[in-house]
Amino acid sequence: QEWEDGQRKGKSKVVCGYPLSIFFIVVNEFCERFSYYGMRAVLVLYFKYFLRWDDDLATSIYHTFVALCYLTPILGAIVADSWLGKFKTIIYLSIVYAVGQVAMAVSAIHDITDSDRDGTPDSMTFHIVLSMVGLFLIALGTGGIKPCVAAFGGDQFGEHQDRQRRTFFSVFYLCINGGSLLSTIITPVLRAQECGIYSKQKCYSLAFGVPAALMVVALVVFIIGSGMYYKAEPQGNIMLDVCKCIGFAIKNRYRHRSKQYPKRQHWMDWAEEKYDKLLIAQIKMVLKVLFLYIPLPMFWTLFDQKGSRWTLQATTMDGNFGALVIQPDQMQTVNPILILTLVPIMDSLIYPLIKKCGLNFTPLKRMTVGMLLAAIAFVCAALVQIQIDKTLPTFPSTSQSQLKLLNMGSNSVTVKLPGNDALILPAAQVYPFINNSEIVENQAITFVGFTDYFLVYFRFVNGMKTAVNVSTAAADFGLIEPFYYSNYSQIKNGKATFTLRSGSQSCEYSTNFGFGSSYTFFIHSTLVFGSNCQDSVTAVEDIKPNSVHMALQIPQYFFITAGEVMFSVTGLEFSYSQAPSNMKAVLQAGWLFTVAIGNFIVLIVAELAKIPKQWAEYVLFASLLVAVCVIFSIMAYFYTYIDPTEIEAQFKKKINEDDEDDKSKPGKAEVEMVKRDSIKCHDEYDKATQTKM
Ligand SMILES: CC(C)C[C@H](NC(=O)[C@@H](N)Cc1ccccc1)C(=O)O
């Protein structure tokens, strides 16, 4: 250890107690996360609008990609810990990653296959294949390097630099969120630009190209720091050794199941006949942590719904913040913004304050509180949903029909529908009507879709005896025959001015469209062209504008992010500090694997539960997390913190002493010695594992 610390000191300059080398690692992480989140931000829209996939296919491929990104860390960790070492693994996989990003950018250039120059690609297969190859390489790269970069950063600190290492992990998390915040703001703006050689299209190639460039920058920055890093050597195919050792322990235990064989302290001790005691002790440390990970995916199940359920919830809300109009998917940027504020506040204020109060707020306690905060966030989401549900239009059920009665005349009329009381419909009025008897085939038109958030739907009904043309400054919506109606058209929300024209005569009608609304405009028979036609058009709300403000989502974002800071930032450091030296990246990968499982749970629960009320689904998720949290706190209570370096040092010392002994006493009763060693090593292990939750 001293030698290793010496190596660290010799390699990198120390600035304010921190090795300079970590500067390159955090800048690398910033650029890499910019690249990843920037590409991810526009991915679904690329599938939908460029590759022309439907919503379901786009969503499934998107989630599969995200899950793959959190499965590949295992591969990266194995390669790093047992073969290439973390440094080389990061370099090689970053190259794979950058190639993947470039492939994505190229796949989004429509001109490549647009031989008829009509603005759409002629061979979609080329674009699909190239983008899928690109995504596969990106998943391999981003997932592969993820456990290595965090663990490699941790490696730069010596045994006695726990405090600095903890700060490093906090800064590391800030960089992740700094990079993702910038990119999720920038790449949607780039995508909205128009570009192309022969014809102009939405610029997905630029939105993917900039993340590709950032990945190259990340790689270059990491290489520049090369001379300063402490590079721990890989220690053989450790994963294979671990699997063989566990397999042998199980087999050996099974072979000696009769009562005549004395019990051993731990089932892994049954591997002692064949395997190194140090390896057995290291496996015990890893298994203890992995066991503790079992309930953790539930946290990620809730956490990752920010990008799906919460974004969909935002589509039914009002995003008008005065000077700023927020898109539903842009609400997600609240998460990194809060991370950037909360991490420093927690580190420099809340945690020290708790410590001053004499409370031992251990990592596992923090993670438990983090889980509870996430559950509270979902309760907030449920409350918001209840508010939204109150404002949603009533749609006909499967056994009902919806009618809209329009009185286009200038006198009121009495309407009698079979099975219903007569009603008086005044002149120029519209009456929405849900009928229990199926008068017409059941159908309801709903206009949902967050990609069209800024668009609202409208149609005109012409109550005049002459045909009327409807247009705005930007578009012509065509001619509407007398006593007939137009199809629904889309227009940007906000103020709109329509010009109604009949022959050479015209008049203007202005109105305001709220988010998510839909209108039928009824042109009265009494309209006189050439005058103000504002009073001669009646606007009927088919769907009311979203009235619950998006700001109401801020509390749920606050709680989930506070939960993330306590759970995720702490978990990242916990996974590093509790891992044996040769299995640090493996445990980081195990940590990320819980994220992948959490994402799969979202898909499974959403598919299986099929809860009709969204607020009830939020409450279900919150309750599940509270239940899991109780189990986790019990498991955490029995967990004893270890200092892997100390345990390993004691084992190594013991093994050296034994080697000396063996040289001086050849042929002595070996079995006795193994027993004695075993007891002594257990004592050492127990001494080093005394702190509880
Ligand atoms: C939690 C991840 C497994 C780890 C981390 N993610 C974050 O820190 C998120 N807060 C980032 C983010 C940004 C924008 C929108 C959603 C999430 C990571 O990516 O390493």
Image (cartoon, rainbow, N blue to C red):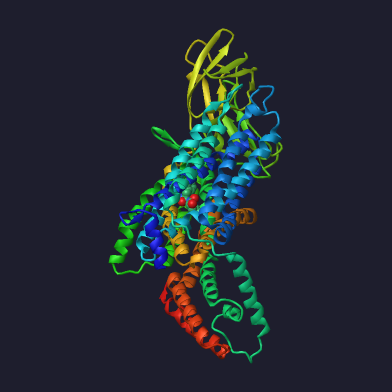
Tell which of 264 and 432 is nearer to you: 264
Residue at the top extreme of this rendering = 504
Q: Specify the quadrant of the image occupied by residue 419.
A: top right
Q: Specify the quadrant of the image occupied by residue 616.
A: bottom right
Tell which of 569 and 230 is nearer to you: 230
Residue at the left extreme of this rendering = 356
Q: Is residue 464 above or below residue 111?
A: above
**Count of numbered marks:** 0
Q: Residue at x 62, y 13 (%)?
A: 466
Left/right of residue 362 with respect to residue 682 in the rendered view: left
Tell which of 547 and 179 is nearer to you: 179
Using the rendered image of the protein, determine whether residue 619 is visible from the camera's viewpoint.
Answer: no
Tell which of 230 and 114 is nearer to you: 230
Q: Is residue 342 above or below residue 282?
A: above
Q: Position of residue 536 (x, y in %)?
A: 51, 19
- Dividing the image into 4 quarters, which one contains the C terminus? bottom left
Using the rendered image of the protein, determine whether residue 50 is visible from the camera's viewpoint.
Answer: yes
- Dividing the image into 4 quarters, which one contains the N terminus? bottom left
Q: Position of residue 574 (x, y in %)?
A: 45, 64
Q: Residue at x 62, y 49 (%)?
A: 64
Q: Position of residue 423 (x, y in %)?
A: 59, 34
Q: Position of residue 91 (x, y in %)?
A: 53, 49
Q: Is residue 562 above or below residue 473?
A: below
